[in-house]
């Protein structure tokens, strides 16, 4: 359900918190941090709500993304918990080993790398949309995506088909 113009804050929170929570969990890899991240984003959005026009969701999501990176910079370490609490797509649920490998690899990426991959492949944003959400140039978003995918290939070669490794095409033939 998309939020719409004129939607009051309380309705927005009720309608969009589950989706925002899933994204926050993928960004942080920790249920408690994800909850804090959503609460922080909603608090900031509530303060700005009277000034928002149109769909408020992109604004709230941008707060999620940038706040997560800000927290990561202040902590200067990555969480060690796997990303096991989100509702995985059917293809991932059918192969637990693949899901575990993906979760472990994502947990070992930097926060920025994980964020750009979540935006590009979970949120299905374009490079331009990803860059706008993070407040960076599209070229930087493209570069971060490329670096993150390369690191995934190194960390988890068994995921080569998911991250577009040329060797995977050879194996598939």
Image: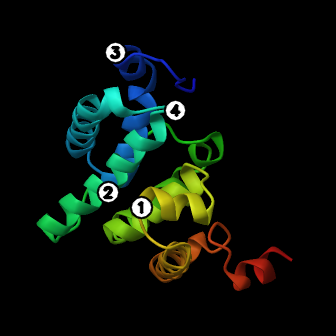
Residue 170 percent coordinates (x, y): 80, 83
Residue 167 percent coordinates (x, y): 71, 85
Q: How far, Cα to Cα, is label 2 from label 3?
A: 23 Å
Q: Earlier in the sequence, mark 1 or mark 3?
A: 3
In this rendering, is residue 5 above or below 132?
Answer: above
Q: How far, Cα to Cα, is label 1 from label 3?
A: 26 Å
Residue 71 percent coordinates (x, y): 19, 58
Q: Are marks 2 and 3 in contact (CB under 8 Å)?
A: no
Of circles 4 and 3, which is in front?
4
117 or 66: nearer the viewer? 66
The residue at which mark 2 appears reads as 66
Q: Earlier in the sequence, mark 4 or mark 3?
A: 3
93 or 21: nearer the viewer? 21
Residue 158 seen in the current view: yes
- Asked which secondary structure carries label 1, the reply is helix
Q: Is residue 138 left or right of residue 18?
A: right
Q: Quadrant of residue 79?
A: bottom left
Of circles 4 and 1, which is in front?
4
Q: Are marks 4 and 2 in contact (CB under 8 Å)?
A: no
Q: Is residue 131 left or right of residue 159?
A: left
| Residue at 51 percent of width and 32 percent of height | 55
Q: How many marks?
A: 4
- Asked which secondary structure carries label 2, the reply is helix
The label number, if any, that marks residue 55 in the structure image: 4
| Residue at 49 percent of width and 81 percent of height | 147
Q: Residues within 10 Å of mark 3 (few under 14, many from 20)?
A: few
The residue at which mark 3 appears reads as 10
Q: Are marks 1 and 2 in contact (CB under 8 Å)?
A: yes
Q: Earlier in the sequence, mark 4 or mark 2?
A: 4
Q: Earlier in the sequence, mark 2 or mark 3?
A: 3
Q: Are marks 1 and 3 in contact (CB under 8 Å)?
A: no
């Amino acid at each position: 359900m998309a939020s719409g113009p004129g939607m009051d804050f309380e309705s927005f929170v009720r309608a969009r918190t589950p989706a925002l929570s899933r994204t926050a969990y993928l960004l942080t890899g920790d249920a408690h941090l994800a909850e804090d991240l959503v609460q922080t984003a909603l608090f900031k959005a509530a303060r700005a709500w009277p000034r928002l026009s149109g769909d408020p969701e992109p604004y709230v999501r941008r707060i999620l993304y940038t706040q997560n990176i800000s927290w990561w910079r202040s902590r200067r370490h990555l969480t060690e918990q796997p990303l096991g609490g989100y509702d995985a797509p059917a293809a991932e649920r059918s192969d637990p080993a693949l899901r575990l490998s993906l979760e472990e690899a994502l947990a070992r990426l930097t926060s920025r790398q994980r964020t750009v991959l979540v935006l590009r492949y979970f949120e299905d944003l374009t490079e331009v949309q990803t860059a706008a959400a993070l407040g960076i140039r599209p070229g930087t978003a493209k570069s971060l995506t490329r670096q993150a995918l390369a690191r995934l290939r190194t960390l988890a070669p068994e995921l080569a088909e998911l991250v577009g490794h040329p060797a995977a095409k050879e194996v598939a033939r």
